[in-house]
Image (cartoon, rainbow, N blue to C red):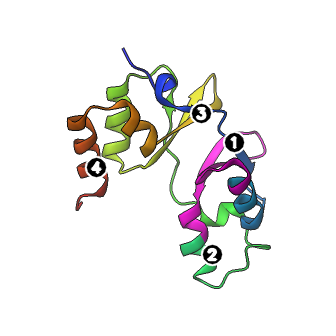
Amino acid sequence: MTTARDIMKPGAQWIAKDETVGKAARVMAELGVGSLVIADENERMCGIITDRDIVVKCIAQGRPPATTRAEELCEATPRWIDADADIDEVLDEMESHRIKRMPVIEDKRLVGMISEADLARHLNDNQLGEFVTAVYGRP
């Protein structure tokens, strides 16, 4: 059985919700990633910020990245998956919520992130096609 742990990129990072969007962008650039988990003061996940969020919700809106807080760009309750979840559970969660990046949690701690690229490396053509249709198809 393939699990979330088997396909995730380990070592995902988070930043505090009151950090600036500018800091989030610098951390993403340093790590070579397109998203970061946003955590509250108790290190609980309260959102995800993506490189696209920074461009569309901050830069394009004329908001200053140096003073806009990361939490201001987060929407809705973040979804996550347990590290031991089966690949079918991962796909169900990502497809049903149209999610492109999924945090992986173990013992209430962030241990990794699953991206579209991770799925592409581990799914067969049919599974990948179903994922793409579910996430990118019309609602």
Q: Where is residue 124 in the image (x, y as percent from the top left)?
A: 26, 31
Residue type at tag 3: Gly
SS for callout 1:
loop
Residue where numbered disc 3 is placed: 112
Residue where numbered disc 1 is placed: 13
Say if 79 sits above or below 2 in the image.
below
Splitting the image into 4 quarters, where does residue 22 fall?
bottom right
Which of the two discs, 1 and 2, labels the residue nearer the N terminus?
A: 1
Question: Can you tell which of label 2 and label 4 is closer to the viewer?
Answer: 4
Which of the two discs, 2 and 4, labels the residue nearer the N terminus?
A: 2
Q: Say if the magenta span includes residue 41.
A: yes
Farthest residue to the left: give it: 126
Residue where numbered disc 2 is placed: 58
- Mark 1, Cα crowd under 10 Å, few <14 / some 14-19 / many 20+, is some
Which span is picked out in magenta? Answer: 29-54
Quick check: can you spot residue 15?
A: yes
Residue type at tag 2: Cys
Q: In which quarter of the image is the N terminus?
A: top left
Horizontally, is 52 left or right of 123 in the view?
Answer: right
Which of the two discs, 3 and 2, labels the residue nearer the N terminus?
A: 2
Residue type at tag 1: Gln
Q: Distance between the residues labelled 2 and 4?
A: 27 Å
Which of the two discs, 4 and 1, labels the residue nearer the N terminus?
A: 1
Q: Distance between the residues labelled 4 and 3?
A: 22 Å
Q: Distance between the residues labelled 4 and 1?
A: 26 Å
